[in-house]
Amino acid sequence: MDTLPDTPPLEELTTFLERHPRLFVLTGAGCSTESGIPDYRDAQGAWKRKPPVTYQAFMNDPGVRHRYWARSFIGWRWFGRARPNGAHEVLARLEREGRVEKLVTQNVDRLHQAAGSQDVIDLHGRMDRMVCMTCGERVARQPFQLQLLERNPSWAHLDADAAPDGDADLEGHDFSAFDVPGCERCGGLLKPDVVFFGEKVPADRVTESMAALERADAMLVVGSSLMVYSGFRFALAAAKLGKPIVAINLGRTRADDLLALKVSRSCAEALAAV
């Protein structure tokens, strides 16, 4: 690990990035909070709310699916309109300058792409697309949102507070009455094209990410507590490879004892300084 002079954290971050010109970047929910998308965990890495629906519950329980889609129907109104913030924009600029070996994001909001980043791995998938669990057909979310509106016009006037990943805190309704269409090709069950809790990240995404980590000079964590193993595995791998790790995160991370440097600032504020 690098031994840096006793300077303010943002100067240390700048120095770290100057010393390590090719970065493997991993981003999490904290990167998007300033775009209005809530995160899951508090400063200690604990859940702020009930954990999200699991893959097993979504696939096996029609009641869970109806509740999920009713809440997502409301949540998509604001989630689909979210725009990149300063953190996304700085990371896109670093890529244009040839400073990013690969950007791997745990977020499903596609805000990195909207900011201009091109070499991105959506580790947990993307919320703007649907996948049929029977035939594998993939369709855009916005037309599906219009189908939900046509089938459930009485839900259009409802509102709720924003929750992580396009969810909404909608309670006290008969979710069983919410009509969810199936796949237009085969009638199969549609699911957001994201990795739910209890579902495995596709192996090709992990393989490509690990290869990029091996090529990089260092790992930069932006807005992730790394409490989920899908992201923490890269910190473990970086440490094993002898790659220094710097994290920008408000609160504890699972990899605190592996870090060369930690900056406890908002992602946009810290990255603006570099």
Image (cartoon, rainbow, N blue to C red):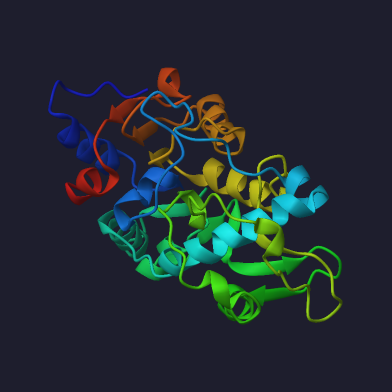
Residue 151 horizontal/vertical position (percent): 66, 78
Front-lying residue, 119 or 59: 59
- Residue 160 in view: yes
In the image, is residue 262 above or below residue 149?
Answer: above
Residue 95 horizontal/vertical position (percent): 37, 60
Q: Quadrant of residue 257?
A: top left
Q: Residue at x 58, y 55 (%)?
A: 173
Q: Residue at x 17, y 22 (%)?
A: 5
Residue 66 horizontal/vertical position (percent): 69, 58
In the image, is residue 18 above or below residue 253?
Answer: below
Front-lying residue, 19 or 188: 188
Q: Residue at x 67, y 68 (%)?
A: 130
Q: Quadrant of residue 136?
A: bottom right
> Does residue 61 appear to the left or right of 163 in the view shown?
right
- In the current view of this chain or complex, which residue is farthest to the top? 257
Front-lying residue, 31 or 241: 31
In the image, is residue 262 above or below residue 117?
Answer: above
Q: Residue at x 56, y 60 (%)?
A: 72
Residue 186 horizontal/vertical position (percent): 87, 77
> Does residue 73 appear to the left or right of 163 in the view shown?
right
